[in-house]
Image: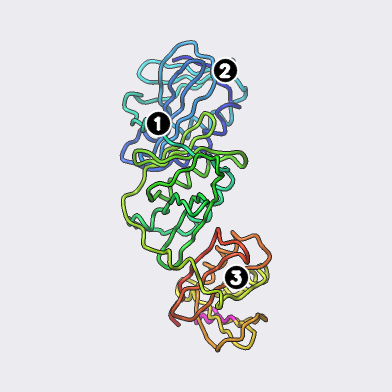
Amino acid sequence: MRITIHKSTIADVLSQIQGLTGRKTNLIITENVLLQTRENGVELTATDLETGFEGFFPAEVEAEGAVTINSRKFNEIVKNFPTDAIRMSEMENNWVEIASDNVEYHIVGMDPEEFPETPKIDEVSFFSMASPELKKMIEKTVAVGVGGDEKRAHLIGVNLERIEQGNDNLLRMVSTDIRRLAKADYLCDPDSGFAPGPTVIVPKKGLNELNRFLPAEGRVQVGIKDNYLIAKKENETISVKLLNGMFPAYEELLAPDPAYDIIFDRNLLLMMLKRMSILTSEEYRGVVFHLENNEITMRTVNAALGESKESMEIAYDRHQQEIAFNPRYFIDALNFISTDKVRLNIQDEDHPCIVRSEDDLSYLNIIMPMKI
């Protein structure tokens, strides 16, 4: 292989795939990228065995071939290369030369034949959606994450549904960590090519990688085929391998009784929760909500740090009650809501609190209470 490619063409994408190639797998070669010549350009492939990226980039092809090269070092070389034009040549024993008139690198590569195959998925039924909206949906749902060695699909993945609801076509993402649940909907255009289909579970780490590639404007093609979620933009394609498992039933929680709704000023509530969370810790995570006589009083008690209390006037004329919640969950939810007013559906200590915008049900959070 012998090509000339431009720094401005591949610098951004090399930066974006570092999350893929930096992930440890049982194959060292996945730390590399595969470059293969095509007519009038080069195809770049990266994978962590669960999420794959393929992109075609224009280049001057002098000799056909394929090479693999360490992704991290290749990214650093390109990022700091002094000229826009970069010459790349395949050498003996899988070495790769990267050069210009004044700069020359000789980099150890690996046999491109050993690079794992990425899925070749044909005849995908794509539908089109706004890229910024898909980014928002991913960010809202992967924020509800679990750590450690968790393997259960419904906790490490996001439930993705394609729903026909009357005359509306909805793409829905739902995520849970047992203590809370986030739901985000997107209303697809009638001419988007949307069609209802089976529910699938997409790994959160794969969605995080997909989010890196989504443009801040424009549209993206989305499809599901052969156990993969596929997203396509221009000359780049991302494929994320789906998880096997069942997502818990949640639908009955999506229609809260409006009699228990309390309207809050979003910014005032957010800042109050942030102040209350200052004295929380791993051992003392809870904040007690005391509701009575058109007022909410929040209280934090931490034996190691101290205590705090703050009150706010609200429209509340029901019976007195105290319910404990993790304030971090409310802060996460409110950070994704942009309206001035929010609704908290607070029933009692035996039911979850539902957080949503005052007039938009496309995004909501369901937060379980804590034992006092």
Q: Position of residue 209 (x, y in %)?
A: 47, 43
Disc assigned to residue 343? 3
Foreground disc of the pair 2, 3: 3
Few, some or many residues within 10 Å of mark 2 (<14, 14–19, 20+): some
- The type of residue carrying mark 3 is Arg
- The reply, left or right, for residue 257 in relation to residue 297 is left
Q: How many marks?
A: 3
Q: Residue at x 65, y 60 (%)?
A: 338
Disc assigned to residue 123? 1
User: Which quarter of the rendered picture does the N terminus lie within?
Assistant: top left
Marks 2/3: CA distance? 60 Å
Reading the image, the residue beneath label 2 is 100
Q: Are marks 1 and 2 in contact (CB under 8 Å)?
A: no
- The type of residue carrying mark 2 is Ser
- The reply, left or right, for residue 11 in relation to residue 225 is right
Foreground disc of the pair 3, 1: 1
Q: Residue at x 50, y 21 (%)?
A: 98
Few, some or many residues within 10 Å of mark 3 (<14, 14–19, 20+): many
Q: Position of residue 303 (x, y in %)?
A: 50, 82
Q: Does the magenta portion include 303?
A: yes
Label 2, secondary structure: give it: loop
- The reply, left or right, for residue 159 in relation to residue 319 is left
Q: Does the magenta portion include 278?
A: no
Who comes first in sequence, dot 2 or dot 3? 2
Foreground disc of the pair 1, 2: 1
Who comes first in sequence, dot 1 or dot 2? 2
For the record, the magenta segment spans 298-305
User: Which quarter of the rendered picture does the C terminus lie within?
Assistant: bottom left
